[in-house]
Structures are given as structure tokens and as C-alpha cells.
Image: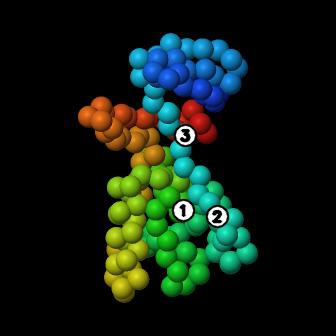
Amino acid sequence: MHRTGESIIEIGAEGHEVRRASGQAIATDLVCIAVGVKPNLAWLRGSGLAIERALVVNEKMETNVAGIYAAGDVVQTENLVTGKTIVNGLWANAVDMGRTAGINMAGGKLKYAGSLEVMNATEIERVAFISVCNILARR
């Protein structure tokens, strides 16, 4: 069972029940919460850097201001499946973006291909967690 569009306001002490904002209680065996990433860009407003959902960069991870590069969850890049702009806060993608930015800052010509926003996976206490979103349903 999945529930979307409403916040969880409480998780029981043993994690076996959650209470939604509507007041409805739901019995659970496991709770996985995936809320996404929203970059904090307020401090960059008025800087001259192009900002939409996040900092706008080109395939070299360079902003609209020559010589200024950015990477990670503060930038928007292209979704490899849809071709649409996404903000992807996954560590592995940030590493690739940072590598691309660093090589290009040093005079290289590397292009960041883009990433997927449909999944995040991690392991906590030897339990694998995977969160998946339906990118087409959110549009």
C-alpha cells in the first residue's frame, strides 16, 4: 500500500503505526519516507546567476556567468529518460557532476550527460531501502 499527498505528523515509538495529517492512523511494518530535495538558493538571489528550480548550468556544469561552475543538489540537469530539467540530490550524481565541473575548471572538455530521477537506494542497518517516484504522474 502506498499513500501520497499528505504529510505524516507522527511515527509511533516502536515504528508500527504512523499518523497522517488527516488524523488517520495506519499500521505499519516499515516506514520509508522520501520527500525529495529543494536547494537553498535564497543567498544567491541578485547574484546574476540564472536560477529556475535550481542553478542553471550547461553540460560542462558552468553557470551563465563564465568561470563559475556548480554541481550537486544545487543545480538542475537533464533527465536522461524524459529530457526535462530535474534537480537530483543523489550523492553518486553529485560526484559525477563535481568531476565534470572540476575537469572543465582545469581546462578540460568533459560533458555531463544527465541523470535519472526515478530512484534512490540506500542501506540502513543492513536493510535496503529504495524509493521510486513516478515522474510522469508528477508533471
Query: Which residue, given by chain and number where applicable, does mark 2 sit on?
Result: 41
SS at circle 2: loop
User: Which mark sits nearer the N-terminus, 2 or 3?
Assistant: 3
Q: Residue 32: give x, y in percent of width and height.
A: 45, 30
Q: Residue 80: give x, y in percent of width and height.
A: 42, 51
How far apart are the two marked residues, 2 and 1, measured between alpha carbons?
A: 8 Å
Image quadrant in which you'd find residue 23:
top right
Q: Amino acid at mark 3?
A: Val
Q: Residue at x 68, y 24 (%)?
A: 21
Left or right, residue 60 beside residue 4: left
Q: Residue furthest right?
A: 46
Q: Residue at x 41, y 74 (%)?
A: 101
Between 32 and 74, the residue placed more toward the observer is 32
Q: Residue 108: give x, y in percent of width and height.
A: 34, 82
Residue 35 has which mark? 3
User: Which mark sits nearer the N-terminus, 2 or 1?
Assistant: 2
The crowd level at tag 2 (other Cα within 10 Å; few <14, some 14-19, many 20+) is some
Q: Residue at x 50, y 13 (%)?
A: 27
Q: Amino acid at mark 1?
A: Val
Asked if the residue at tag 1 contacts the one at tag 2, i.e. Cβ–Cβ closer than 8 Å, the answer is yes
Q: How many marks?
A: 3
Left or right, residue 111 beside residue 47: left
Query: Which residue, given by chain and number where applicable, does mark 1 sit on?
Result: 74
